[in-house]
Image (cartoon, rainbow, N blue to C red):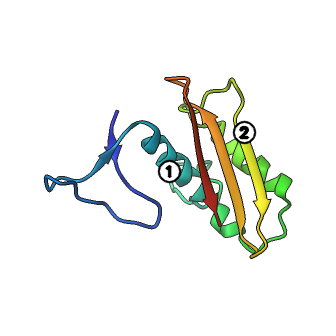
Amino acid sequence: MADLSLEWHSDLEIDSTGDILVVDGDDEVRQRLERRLFTAVHGYVWHKDYGAGLPQKIGSALSLYEIRSIVSSQLALEASVATSPPLELGVAMRNDGLCTISIKYWDARTGVSVSFAITA
């Protein structure tokens, strides 16, 4: 089912016909997963348990294991992410101090593997 396309730190976009751009499939799921990971803990008044708050953790002394645990537990809450096979996460600190999180999950509906990365 299509949803409004809304990239993190962006605004709604217009498609070639002048309508609001919609997204579905892998892009929709990626946007939803990014939103969950970037939304502040207790950031939604009506859904206090939603969100990992990764941006608020920048500069803290979290270990790569703790980041991996946060991401893994949040993605497990998404119905679009299959529980089997288990998702694959890579968390690494770059030389410039940024953290890269590579995510590979299997779509619960199609069974197809999907990969993307986040750098913060």
Mark closer to the observer (1, 2): 2
Q: Kindly tell me whether residue 41 is visible in this rendering.
A: no
Q: Residue furthest front?
A: 95
Q: What is the three-letter code of the residue carrying label 2?
A: Glu
Above-or-below relation of 32 to 108 = below
Q: Position of residue 103 (x, y in %)?
A: 65, 45
Nearer to the camera, 45 or 39: 39
Above-or-below relation of 36 to 56 = above
Which disc is residue 88 wearing?
A: 2
Q: Is residue 13 left or right of residue 29?
A: left
Q: Position of residue 21 (x, y in %)?
A: 27, 51
Which disc is residue 46 wearing?
A: 1
Compute the Cα span from label 1 to label 2. Answer: 31 Å
Which secondary structure lies at badge 1?
loop
Q: What residue appears at the point 62 percent right and 58 percent down from the top-left corner?
A: 118
Q: What residue appears at the point 83 percent right and 63 percent down from the top-left corner?
A: 62
Q: What residue appears at the point 72 percent right and 30 percent down from the top-left corner?
A: 86
Above-or-below relation of 27 to 85 = below
Q: Position of residue 105 (x, y in %)?
A: 63, 36
The quadrant in which residue 18 appears is: bottom left
Which secondary structure lies at badge 2?
strand
Q: Kindly tell me whether residue 25 is visible in this rendering.
A: yes
Q: What residue appears at the point 13 percent right and 52 percent down from the top-left corner?
A: 17
Indicate the quadrant containing the C terminus: top left, top right, bottom left or bottom right: bottom right
Q: Residues within 10 Å of mark 1 (few under 14, many from 20)?
A: few
Nearer to the camera, 40 or 87: 87
Q: Residue furthest left?
A: 17
Indicate the quadrant containing the N terminus: top left, top right, bottom left or bottom right: top left
Q: Is residue 64 left or right of residue 15?
A: right
Q: Residues within 10 Å of mark 2 (few under 14, many from 20)?
A: few
